Amino acid sequence: MPNRLDLPAGFRWGASTAAYQIEGAVEEGGRGPSVWDVFAARPGAVRDGHTGAVACDHYHRWPEDVALMRGLGLDGYRFSIAWPRIQPTGAGPVNPEGLAFYDRLVDALLTAGITPLPTLFHWDLPQALEETGGWLDRDTAYRFAEYTSEVVDRLGDRVPAWITLNEPFVHMVYGYALGIHAPGHALMLDALPAAHHQLLGHGLAAAVLREHGREVLIANNLTPVRPASDDPADVAAAEAYDALHNRLFTDPLLLGRYPDLSAFGIGEDLGGAVRDGDLELIAGPGLDGLGVNYYNPTRIAAPTDPGLPFAEAPIEGVPRTAFGWPVVPDGLRELLTGLRSRYGAALPPITITENGCSVADEPASDGTVLDPDRIAYLAGHLDALAAAVAEAVDVRGYYTWSLLDNYEWAEGFGQRFGLVHVDFETQVRTPKASYAWYRDLIAAHRERSVS
Ligand code: FCB
């Protein structure tokens, strides 16, 4: 069996974060309000009323955080750019202080030998754009391309590859269908235009990036879908769920068409959102890389509620993270080999842009933070990744979620995903045992690759 040390030479090791989850300083540097500031202030929206107003205070402590990355020996760092720092109202002139923040960060990363991999949209839409419809409004896609142009004009000379969107599926479902993330709409299937407009925004932004000769990726949350049994009703339900979660966001990018969503009563125009020429724009000349965020597989059974064509079924007999998510490392191999079978030559090289787990970590009395469950999670998933590579899936890198404990959206500070523990009262950073483990793995892999 291949293992993580067998990953190819040149394989890129990274860590990920996102702006609203770590930066804080929401009223500094000319930043405008985002949908997350407004949503988090709503009573009951986020566990314990937590907000990202301070988060990890990365806006002020970024030099320390870059030093932590350097200590790991990372090849790459995936972070996101806060649109409301660049355009406080989502349109019009840029805020020079906002751009300058990321400019300094990019230079510091390069000095540390770390390639920046920015995400242009990780859910923190300027609130002013929400007030004109957010991603339900087609115009937001055009605003996104304008914002992209401003950022790439400034940073593109030093940043070779860019991620347009983070997890358009999760943003559509949690933000627009169920209302458990910002902007908090509970539109159920009427949320589908938010999928199309995000993808259109991706297509328009990708064209801007290509004009600058930059590489284009998107980070999708993908899950292997397993039917609860081989009963045809369970199998049909699993297919419907797979179309909604996975194919809705990869078929248009890789095949230039939407999947069949007729099980949901949805036509090919996604509720009237799709116009002539949109799918050509979304697919463009192709992606330079597909970012895959993987956490767990999904088990699906025939529906119990008449409103949807599927029901989620529990995965039994496996460990669970502090979040309650099932731990199934081989699901990553299953996902990647499944993508290759489904898309064949249309599948671009893959980068794992997120993978990790939450653990209820607290420092021991001697100050150390031991997190054997995280180490086991990472080791298992990296071995599964090596198995997929041995089965000829082209995977170029792995960015663990996350560098730091941070603001976990609707869970507030209740879920810790970091290699580095953050005390949210004092902002003291303490590398966990998994930090040393990841550092040693990166060094051992590099040594093996050169010898
Ligand atoms: C993903 C998000 C990321 C983080 C992890 C745990 O869905 O992209 O911001 O919250 O989950």
Image (cartoon, helix red, strand yellow):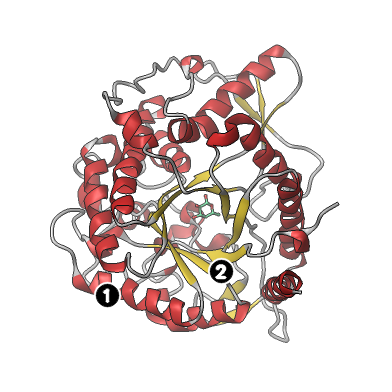
Query: What kind of element bears circle 2?
Result: loop
299 sits left or right of 20 in the view = right
Q: Nearer the viewer, residue 451 or 30?
A: 451
Percent across and percent down for residue 57 are 41, 75
Residue at horizontal 65 percent and vertical 32 percent from the top: 341
- The amino acid type found where label 2 is placed reads Leu
- Looking at the image, residue 154 lies above or below residue 209: below
Q: Is residue 426 visible?
A: no
228 sits left or right of 84 in the view = right
- Looking at the image, residue 189 lies above or below residue 354: above
Query: What kind of element bears circle 1?
Result: helix
Percent across and percent down for residue 17 are 49, 63
Residue at horizontal 32 percent and vertical 64 percent from the top: 156
- The amino acid type found where label 1 is placed reads Ala
Q: Nearer the viewer, residue 159 or 52?
A: 159
Percent across and percent down for residue 108 are 42, 80
Q: Nearer the viewer, residue 43 or 331?
A: 331
The residue where tag 1 is placed is 100
